[in-house]
Amino acid sequence: MPPHPTDKQPKTHQRSTTPGPCIPDDAFKPIEGDDKKIAAALKKRNAAERGGQLSFHTEERIWVSNTAFAASLRDITAAQTNTLRDVRLQSSRFRELEQSADYLRALHISDAWCAAFVWPKVQGAPTPVTEGVFRDLQSAGAGIPVSTNEEIIRLAQQYKFFHWHLEFPEVFTVSETVDGDVDTSSGWTGGFSCVLGNPPWERIKLQEQEFFAQRDATIANASNAAARKHLITELPNTNPDLFAEFTAAKRQAESESQFLRLSLRYPLTGRGDINTYAIFAETDRMMTGPRGRMGIIVPTGIATDATTQFFFKDLVTNGQLAALYDFENEDKVFPGVHNQMRFCLLTLRGTGNMSEPAQMVFKVRQADQIAERRYHLTAEDILRLNPNTGTCPVFSTRRDAEITLGIYRRLPVFIDESRTDGNPWGVSFMAMFHMANDSHLFRPDAQRGETFEDLLKDGWNLKGNVLVRGDERLLPLYEAKMLHHYDHRFSTYEGATEKQLNKGTLPRLTVEQHQDAAAVPMPRYWVPEQDVPTGEFDKNGREIKLAGVRARLAAKSWDRGWLLGWRDITNKSNERTMINFTFPRVAAPDGTLLMLPSADPIVGLVACLSSFVLDFAARQKVGGTHLKFFTISQLPVASPAQLRNHAHFIAPRVLELVFTSESLRQFARDISDTGAPFRWDPDRRATIRAELDAFFFHLYGVSRDDTSYVLDTFNVTRDNDMKAYGTYRTKELVLTEYDRMAAAGVSLDNPLVDGENYTSTLTPPPGHGPRHEGIRE
């Protein structure tokens, strides 16, 4: 396993002669069980010993050269094998090569380099493989303690180090001379003509619940992460043998992760929450010769996930992607894999060809469906749709691809990281609280057995859905399932049954409840608005406090009295995929992701993100069950300049849809409305939303036939309408308004102004609907 160049986050998979350090200083970062002071001292020693940047493959010493091994192996394989005696002689000569002093020495030195990353950094451990020790090993090996050599052998056996250039010297050439044809990202030139594989799909990080599931049910079934960690800390007293097993497993996982991240051996996939399939994919690519082909079966996330975006974009920009065939597992092609697991057949070219498009197909269930449904995408197409990450769009049909590509040719992406002016909305993203890591801040505290009634007994009073005690405030935690398009009161924990909680659903507020401007949803948890003292002090004597809601929003310079967010957990087959919402300034968990824009008109952004046409584009990006920041950034979102001309049309409609309760009065004030909240009128709301959806179909340049097609792809919306109205009412309303707007000549550059070139069918018009009884401010 040779090292990689010094650039830890390379932009491309280029062939280069840049040498890398022998033993990186990062090899001595502490992991589970290590002494931090000893690790720091070793890191400092290694840096001092390294001096002249000794290189693994390009130093004058040529101990790593496998040229002689390759020549010996060719002599062995070229020998005649006409008789059994010839075959036995050939086998004997091969064993002699494997046991030769030179081969074993090369193997030991390669093992030593790998062992440096997982070496125990504790008092009394054998002398570690720092740069100086490594240089001595490259020489005669004189002066190396026996215990160090024994530890190298032990670690090699424990971690099963494997060195391709030594196992296959006739395939991979590593020599003293490195020219422009040597790929130093892998440390060799050459490769196999064909690489096929079905690598393991396992996370490297130790999963505590999985580890304890068969060992300690109490720990595995703890109510949350904080409770589980508390039980683990008690193990040295309650079950020391299990604790020793746990710490050993944790060190093994952290050691593997440390090597994958810091050795520079896997620059494109050794990051984030590492999964073995991605590491194997990068290795297989390195092993493929310039004229070879590689084909593997891996999760579709290889092409769509954030952690593998660098790898996939590198394939695309270098023209190596030949085909990607995505499968749903509904037909149980893999019986032991969950039916919702998506996997793909990924095929790569050994040498890039940007002019040759890649063959694509998504959501097939059997191999014989590939031929009839596949289509082609060029590298330019993929990078137009996902310029930041180069990840793959998930088109079910060629028509989906054509419509989406047309949209992206007319509209910019939300945030284009390649441009200095690529964030016109001035938006920043935020996950305010994490359900696992911040659970100790949540009240009631389930770990302590606290209940809501206990909070009331402790002096907290409920005002709306905020808990107040003197100057203290606990703000409700709005989970994503409580929110929906233009509805910050979608569902509530109040009255939720055990069955609903087990299914992850909540009771929805009724029309009558929505028509009460004071009605609010009830959360499961509350979170402090103010910072929470911990009783601990820093080195300057200041008390350490945990940041509450106020501090976390202040860190983002967000001073508005409301929030804008979207649901992280989603699916392209749900009723809607991109579900965004405006809601009060409360607490939000990591499933309720926030976007904090600074440009106007914000009402235009709210409407754009809520539209069917934007949702359709989002569905082409979602390959799993998450809608993360990197996907949102690459959605086709009209810019502030493009929407400013249409603000007079958009603003009153968004106002009437959003401002239906007192809790969003600050939002109304920010768009210059001082009236009472609007009454919730389902029929008016359906028409207003249809007007906005039709408007954005026009704005995005989608034809009427394609608009009809897009609406038909929202199967759940159609089915719900059929049950409620006996017809696909949403589609009919949108197409009706689409036709009326077409007659008015609406387009991206032609403003749509009520009363001039377009008149709403509503009386009174949007933004002037009935309001709750109240006094204007």
Image (cartoon, grey):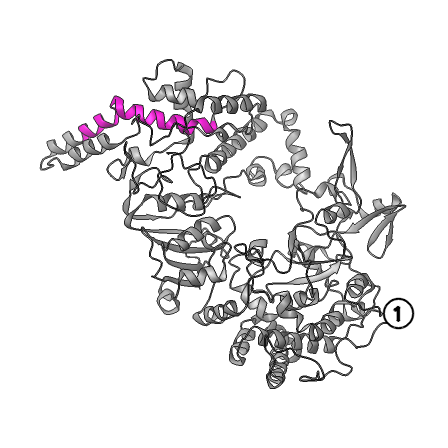
The quarter of the image holding the N terminus is top left
Left or right: 675, with 342 as reference point: right
On the question of residue 365 being in view, the answer is no
Left or right: 356, with 559 as reference point: left
Residue 99, by quadrant, is top left
Residue 93 on the magenta span? yes
Name the residue located 66 percent from the left edge and 65 percent from the top edge.
605
Q: In the image, residue 201 lies at what x, y percent?
A: 45, 46
How many labels sit on residues?
Answer: 1
The quarter of the image holding the C terminus is bottom right
Residue 145 on the magenta span? no
Q: In the image, residue 627 lies at what x, y percent?
A: 58, 57
The residue singled out by tag 1 in the image is 776
Name the residue located 76 percent from the left edge and 65 percent from the top edge.
509
Q: Residue furthest bottom?
A: 743
Q: In the image, residue 469 lies at what x, y percent?
A: 88, 46
Q: Is residue 26 above or below residue 494?
A: above
Q: Nearer the viewer, residue 290 or 89?
A: 290
Q: Nearer the viewer, residue 318 or 632?
A: 318
Q: Main secondary structure of the magenta part?
A: helix
- Graded by Cα atoms within 10 Å as few (under 14), some (14 to 19) or many (20 or more), the crowding at tag 1 reads few
Mark 1: amino acid:
Arg
Name the residue located 33 percent from the left edge and 43 percent from the top edge.
287
Q: What is the secondary structure assignment of the residue under circle 1?
A: loop
What is the span of residues highlighted in magenta in the rendered image? 91-118
Q: Residue furthest left?
A: 82
